[in-house]
Amino acid sequence: MTDNEDLDQDQETEVSETEVEELDMEESTETQAKEKKPKKEKGGKPEKKDPGFFAKIGKWFHELRIELKKVQWPTAKHTANNVVIVIVCVIVVGVCIWIFDSIAGGVVSALLNLFGKV
């Protein structure tokens, strides 16, 4: 054999060993994945049970309480300021509607008087 043929055989051996190592790693990964599944009891059900209805409600209230602690609640001064702004806006909109209603009522009355005397 020549030196080139010896190198080719060595490379094929290295590739084969690498492939064998990869296959071994895949098999060990599959074995580990199978081992991670929850073990079943005699009845055929997994050991870990789904939490009950009341446990879910309790968890929901617990998480709600945690989230409400994160809320930045407004101060009394800020709340009073917002109330005043809302009241002023309601009055302004009410006045605008009253003015529009008065104008529209006057126009309708004028048209009825104009065409109603026929």
Image (cartoon, grey):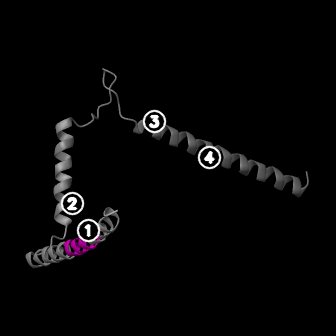
- Counting from the top left corner in percent of width and height, residue 103 is at 27, 73
- The quadrant holding residue 89 is bottom left
Give whichever of discs 2 and 1 has the lower sequence position: 2
Give whichever of discs 4 and 1 has the lower sequence position: 4
Specify whether 114 is left or right of 12: left
In the depicted structure, whether residue 14 falls above or below residue 26: below
Give whichever of discs 1 and 3 has the lower sequence position: 3
Stretch in magenta: 93-105
Residue projecting furthest to the top: 43
Q: Which amino acid, by three-letter code, is at mark 4?
A: Glu
Residue 104 part of the magenta segment: yes
Check whether the beta carbons of the residues at disc 2 and disc 4 lie within 8 A of each other.
no
Residue 67, label in figure: 2
Marks 3, 4: nearer the viewer: 3
> Which residue was labeled with disc 1?
105
Check whether the beta carbons of the residues at disc 1 and disc 3 lie within 8 A of each other.
no
Separation of residues labelled 2 and 4 (CA atoms): 50 Å
Give whichever of discs 2 and 4 has the lower sequence position: 4
At x 18% / y 40%, what residue is drawn?
55
At x 62% / y 42%, what residue is drawn?
23
